[in-house]
Image: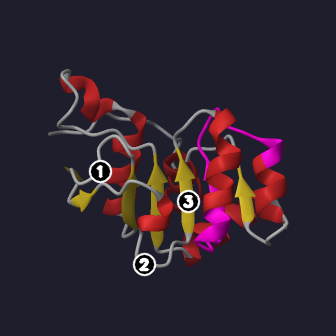
Amino acid sequence: MAEDELIKKTLEISKTIAMVGVSSIKKEVSTNIRRRPSTIVMKYMQEFGYRVIPVNPFSTGEKIHGETIIAKLSDIKVPIDIVDVFRPSQEAPMIAEEAVKIQAKVLWLQYGIQSDEAKKIVELKNITYISNKCIKQEYQRLFLKVNPVFPALKS
């Protein structure tokens, strides 16, 4: 399957995204937190009907965009379609192992993140691997037919 077809199909059939590495708004001193890519992408995907569960062990229990931040993937109590990762590439294999344990359907590494080891881990379990792509930008490009942009969110 061509990459665009794979991404489009993935986004069409998926409903729930676990977003690893979403930043907490409360803990940040700077107001620039609302411009962090993870918070922008989370809000955007919510606006298009996805349930996005934020995962960040340093902000567990806090709320962001109406969802409670969860410590780790295994703490999520609902089935996850996509594990979307905003963490450094070297952490991807560990996150891939967690994605396998929760039986996610897709491991999606955001723009600038890729890992051959993570790819091997998930593909052995028939989990789709997408890397070095922004889920928000791909949604815009494939469904809205607009050039991907990254506008700042309004408060």
Q: Secondary structure at mark 3?
A: strand
Query: CA–CA distance between discs 2 and 3?
Result: 13 Å
119 falls in the magenta region = no
Q: Which residue is mark 3?
A: 83
Q: Quadrant of residue 115?
A: top right
Q: Nearer the viewer, residue 10 or 94?
A: 94
Image point 38% across, 62% down: which residue?
52
Image point 45% across, 71% down: which residue?
16
> How dense is the environment of label 3, judged by Cα within 10 Å: few (below 14), some, or many (20 and up)?
many
Residue 80, image x and y in percent? 51, 72
Q: Which residue is mark 1?
A: 60
**Residue 78, disc:** 2
Q: Nearer the viewer, mark 3 or mark 1?
A: 1
Image quadrant in which the C terminus is located: top left
Query: CA–CA distance between discs 3 and 1?
Result: 17 Å
Answer yes or no: is residue 145 visible.
no
Answer yes or no: is residue 20 visible.
yes
**Residue 21, disc:** none
Q: Quadrant of residue 65?
A: bottom left
Q: In the rendered structure, which segment of residues is drawn in magenta?
A: 99-117
> Farthest top residue?
30
